[in-house]
Amino acid sequence: MNKIKSGRVIVCEYVAQSAYGKHTLVSVYSGDILVQSLPARVPFAFFIELEIEGDGGPTQLKIDVLLGEKSKISADVKIDFEHGKPGVIVLQQSLFQIDEATDLKVKASIDGGRAVTLVRKSINLGVIPA
């Protein structure tokens, strides 16, 4: 049975498919996320790279994006992992309504198993550096 060995998530505003299987990430959020005022509408896209431990092959994944404990995106994804190589999942841009300081989390699970938190970022009110 396959299980998640490791996962990385880059949170940005937009992910574009580039040539030769590459991706271009636009406006990457490093560290926690600051907004100038609340409420705010913020665009997020997610570049997810997963390594699976097991036999590889076709794997049913569930990816959940949460603001606080509220699910904003829930995606069922079937991906064919090659043994020992990471798989890439892109969640394209969605506009998120943020009413208060909260956490943004991305979780993944395989075949209905226990969800693993891949990334957690705080969203807070603050001055955005120039």
Image (tube, grey):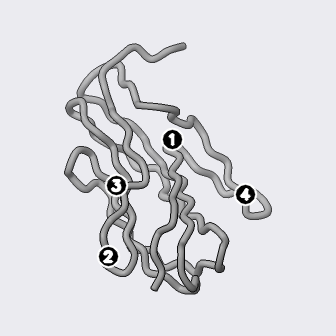
Give the percent coordinates (x, y) of residue 51: 56, 67
Q: CA distance from mark 2 to mark 3?
A: 17 Å
Q: Which mark is residue 113?
A: 2
Horizontal placement of 90 versus 76: left or right? Answer: right
Q: Which residue corresponds to mark 4?
A: 22
Look at 23% across and 44% down and name the residue there.
Answer: 68
Amino acid at circle 2: Gly
Say whether disc 1 or disc 4 marks the residue closer to the N-terminus: 1
- Determine crowd level at label 4: few under 14, some 14-19, many 20+ residues with C-alpha closer than 10 A: few
Q: CA distance from mark 1 to mark 4?
A: 17 Å
Give the percent coordinates (x, y) of residue 72: 28, 54
Q: CA distance from mark 4 to mark 3?
A: 23 Å
Look at 29% across and 39% down and name the residue there.
Answer: 103
Q: CA distance from mark 2 to mark 1?
A: 29 Å
Q: Which residue corresponds to mark 3?
A: 65
Say whether disc 2 or disc 4 marks the residue closer to the N-terminus: 4
Say whether disc 2 or disc 1 marks the residue closer to the N-terminus: 1
Q: Which residue corresponds to mark 1?
A: 13
- Determine crowd level at label 3: few under 14, some 14-19, many 20+ residues with C-alpha closer than 10 A: many
